[in-house]
Image (tube, rainbow, N blue to C red):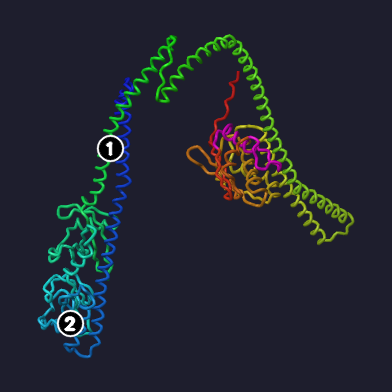
Amino acid sequence: MKRLLSRWMERPRSLRAVLMAAMSAGILLQALLAMAGVHFLLAPTLERSAQTGMRETADAIGRRVAGLMLRAEGAARGAAELLALLPGREPRSLESVLALPVRESPLVIASYWVDAQGIVRAAVRAAAGGSPVADASHIGLDVSRSRILTRAQAGHAGFTEPFLSPVSEGLMVGIAHPTRSDGWLVVEIGLPELSRDLASQLARGGFTAMLYDERGRILAQPDLARSQQSGQLDRPTVGALGAGRVSMADVELDGKVWRVHVGDVDAQGMGWSLAVMRPLTDVQAPIRLLLLSVVLFALLLLLAGFSLAAGLASRLTAQVTRVARQAEALAAGVPVEPAQASSVQEIEALQQGLAQLAAAVREREDRLRQLNAGLEQQVQERTEHLARSRDALEQALATLSQAQAELVHKEKLAALGALVASVAHEMNTPIGNALMASTSLLDRARELVAMVQGGKISRSHFNDSLLAITDAAELAERSLNRAAQLVSSFKQVAADQTSEVHRSFELATLCREIVTVLTPSLRRSGASVVLNIEEGLMLSSYPGPLGQVLSNLIENAVVHGLGNQAGEVRVQAHREGLGQVRIEVQDDGEGMSPEVIQRIYEPFFTTRRGRGGTGLGLTITHNLVTGLLQGQLDVTSHPGGGTVFGVVLPTDLPSPSRPMPG
């Protein structure tokens, strides 16, 4: 279809054909849109309206049936209680009580009392007009084997399933209640009465309905002739009707498809359902009629459009032909007389535009000849200007790269200077303790020598002096060992960070050395570092750049994450995948917004401008990780939820190639 349309558009067509095709296409498009609107907008509205009517009818009838059944059951229960209170069983007293259910409910057609042996002792039936009358014809009838009485004797009081009554001699629904221990009150509800009540409720609206139980037995339907018979729905039909409890269902009954809405009859758990139905053809008839009207109206519009397009096309074709001839003459440079005025504004404007175009073309040809004369000189001047600009930009870029390298180097030196100051401050305590211990040791030794030379020393004084000398020596030894440890850690860290030596090292040892060197600055801020590094995790890489990365991430967590306040920074590492290790530096600080995360690796970007931040720490870290260490750096953070920096590195980074000896 698309290929045929493109071929039709490529071939030249007359104005008449184009106008008629365009108008026809417009009318057809409007018709299609109208039919789509009917199908997608009006049809669902009409169908929803029909469904709403069915749903409201089902709800109203269901409530009425439930109310009538509850009313009959209440009257039967009340009569049973009255019978239980009667001191005797006189016929008149029994008949007056048995008349209550008949009088209270229009559905009750018979009410009788059965003694303990199942013999009918008193009975009342509904006469014409619903008034109760005594029924002596069934007194003495043995109903002990009837279904309703066997259920009542088994302890199932209340409503029963439909049964064939030996008293009313028809299909009934019974209600049985015990009257003390000497008998039962039985009330029978006629299914034809239910059908007549159902037919009266469906007199208007075009619906039909049926009342059925959970086994699919039809209890009532508007067709009074069929209501005298016991109908049974098959299992597939019952299953299809059960789907209507959620939404409308289309069910086939008696060779016809029905739109059905099913509702429950909520009365004493009888398990009855009410199906309100309407033939599917009746439901869809308004939609089909509306679509047919749209199609007929579109055909009428199409015929009118063809007639109108033919007349309009003939008139416009003549005017457009005159304009085309004028344009051909102007293109050939032949002077022509002005064309006749057109009644169409666009064609008149086109004629005037052609005349103005011819004058403008001549004017522009003259200007073009003038411009061509100086074009080469302008091109040469602009080329020279661009060359000078390029040289200036290259020089500026080189200067900027050099300045950035110097700033990065200064940042490294500043970090190393801060490291030296921190280590010096940390070593002050053990060296001072060692000096104090050595001074005390010297004084005790001199005092002991003097007392020995003077012969005035006692055993107890000698022992005290030896203990004091031992304590001072141990204090000096511990202090000097602490200073030696700090010097060793600083020496290794400083050597690594000032050089890029490739070697094998244990990650846990490197992390402990970094934390040891950073301990003075961490102590001042109140922050603590918790290490959770897998022991024995060996790396073959550059410990110096990796140590600088860890130092920068820990200091960034303390300064920016915790704000130089008390808090915890967690450093953990574990193997990830084959030949990789993941190191995470996590803080429980204030976190970062998405806007800040997008810019953290930009040079000179910092959130602590004027408070000690240079904006190069994370830039250097990112360059080291993704460059020399050949790893990946990621970050996860949100405001108030802390920050996690993750570094993924190869455990065995190839060493740089060395030149062959010559």
- Which mark's residue is nearer the viewer, 1 or 2? 1
513 in the magenta segment: no
| Mark sitting earlier along the chain (1/2) | 2
238 relative position to 424: left or right: left
The prevailing secondary structure element of the residues shown in magenta is loop
Q: Which residue lies furthest to the bottom in this view?
A: 87
- At x 25%, y 39%, the residue is 296
Instruction: Give the residue number, with chain letter if any, for mark 1.
Output: 298
Q: Which residue type carries mark 1?
A: Ala
- At x 11%, y 73%, the residue is 169
Instruction: Give the residue number, with chain letter if any, for mark 2.
Output: 113
Residue 300 in picture, x, y percent from top left: 26, 36
Specify the quadrant that holds the N terminus. top left
Question: Camera-side residue: 392 or 587?
Answer: 392
Specify the quadrant that holds the C terminus. top right
Q: In this view, does 111 lie above or below 23?
A: below
